[in-house]
Amino acid sequence: MYTFSNRLRIASFILMAVGVVGIAIGFMSAPSTVEEAKAIVAKHDAGHGEAHAAPASEHHQATDTHMESNEHQVAANHEAGHEAGHDAHLLQQLQNKPWAAVYVAALFFLFIALGVLAFYGINRAAQAGWSPLLFRVMEGITAYLVPGGIIVFVLLAMSVAHMNHLFVWLDPEVVAHDKLIQGKSGYLNGAGLLIRAAIFIGGWVAYRTLSRKWSLAQDKASDNANFVKNFRLSAGFLVFFLISESMMSWDWVMSVDPHWFSTLFGWYVFATMFVSAVTVLALITIYLKSKGYLQQVNNSHIHDLAKFMFAFSIFWTYLWFSQFMLIWYSNIPEEVTYFVTRIQDFKLSYFLMIAINFVLPVLLLINSDFKRINWLVIMTGLIILFGHYLDVYHMIVPATVGDQASIGLTEISALLFFAGLFIFVVFTELTKAPLTPENNPLIEESKHFHY
């Protein structure tokens, strides 16, 4: 049986505590008025801030000196209205910043657990012989689906309750003047968002709960009945997963840009979650082996996990390029704006993310022997996780925070909090059952997996 070390447990509590403090500071630092928003911008960028924060009275005074007709008055009023709208948008962006930081981190860790659940279901349905030794690690990671899913659902409910502006299509004033969003209101509405989220999360957790129950029951069984039930359940779950994951990606991620859509987006999000999931599975497996557990897991198992890290890094890049290329050369305004926003306002971090997620994993893992070197797999895994956090960040933040975005205290604190929670939940779950399954008809094949 695995024992959750006090050092790791305390580290998880420290991460959560530091994260909560940093998140609280981020929310308290968010502006509540236009004047505060202007002051924040001015403090961070004097020239840019002066352009935004120039007092309206100065603008009107300068205009008044040149007004000689009603036409000038109309123009001044229009300019004042434009300035007021810009100021309100600036305030909304800065108020969204801590919400977006929490939402990105919450999605990132939920994606990891969900990706591992899909990987677990695939191995169960395929009756893969190499992986049963890793099933308990997968079951430990997927335990995070419950708290992680609840947190994301609460964040969505807070958006529906208008406690933030992450989803612009939830703002009645915006919808009233936007015919395109009005046309999507049959799907994009608060009630639909929460009902679908409850179905998605409920379905994922139900599969995880039943599969875990039958997995543990198989340890004490005298036949393969529980194994067969798990096989059938997993095959059905994968159908539900493909549908729910695609719709989830539309609801929770793509709809922050309600004027934009991509038929590849569900697969793109899947690639991000899957490569992150396999990476975390590899890191935790190597950690447990270093502590004297999972001794029957050998270099061939680690090699296979590293192959998935390598392969799905390439798959992610293929999907990113396919989506980018098709949209860019077609040059349809409502589609290309997605990439224009990210390239103009996030050029460095956006292209850095692409390099991290493709170039470095390929260079570090292309050699077959490198996939068996634990420290190299760990280093590559940490790079991959950082790169795909940036990926999720760029899915959400450009549409919600815009050019006021930055990775600072709140973003780092949110990552620390959810990392601490993830570690606590996963390693607590690992203590509840033996790490090596018993009576699985494929366990001997897994124990002797070599090539």
Image (cartoon, grey):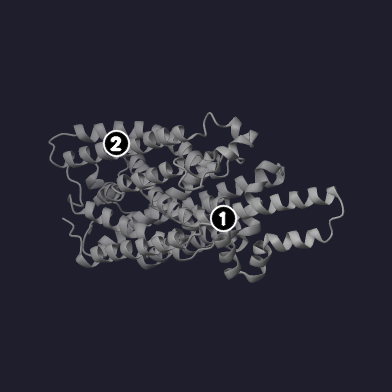
Q: Nearer the viewer, residue 426 or 201?
A: 201
Question: Which of pointers 2 and 1 lies earlier in the amino acid sequence?
Answer: 1
Q: Position of residue 317 (x, y in %)?
A: 55, 52
Badge 2 vs badge 1, beta-carbon distance below 8 Å: no
* 10 Å crowding of disc 1: few (<14), some (14-19), many (20+): many
Q: Amino acid at mark 1?
A: Leu
In the picture, which quadrant includes the N terminus? bottom left
Residue at 25 percent of width and 49 percent of height: 136
Residue at 29 percent of width and 51 percent of height: 449
Q: Nearer the viewer, residue 126 or 60?
A: 60
Secondary structure under tag 1 reads: helix
Taking 93 as reference, is 374 above or below it? below
In the picture, which quadrant includes the C terminus? bottom left
Q: Amino acid at mark 2?
A: Ala
Residue carrying label 2: 206
Taking 365 as reference, is 80 above or below it? above
Left or right: where 129 falls relative to 415: left
Residue at 70 percent of width and 61 percent of height: 57
Task: Please give the label number shown on residue 255.
Answer: none
Left or right: where 42 falls relative to 7: right
- Outermost residue toward the top? 186
Q: Position of residue 7 (x, y in %)?
A: 23, 68
Q: Position of residue 186 (x, y in %)?
A: 53, 28
Secondary structure under tag 2 reads: helix
Residue carrying label 1: 91
* 10 Å crowding of disc 2: few (<14), some (14-19), many (20+): some
- Outermost residue toward the right? 68
Taking 32 as reference, is 202 above or below it? above
Q: Tell me if I can see residue 425 in this picture.
A: yes
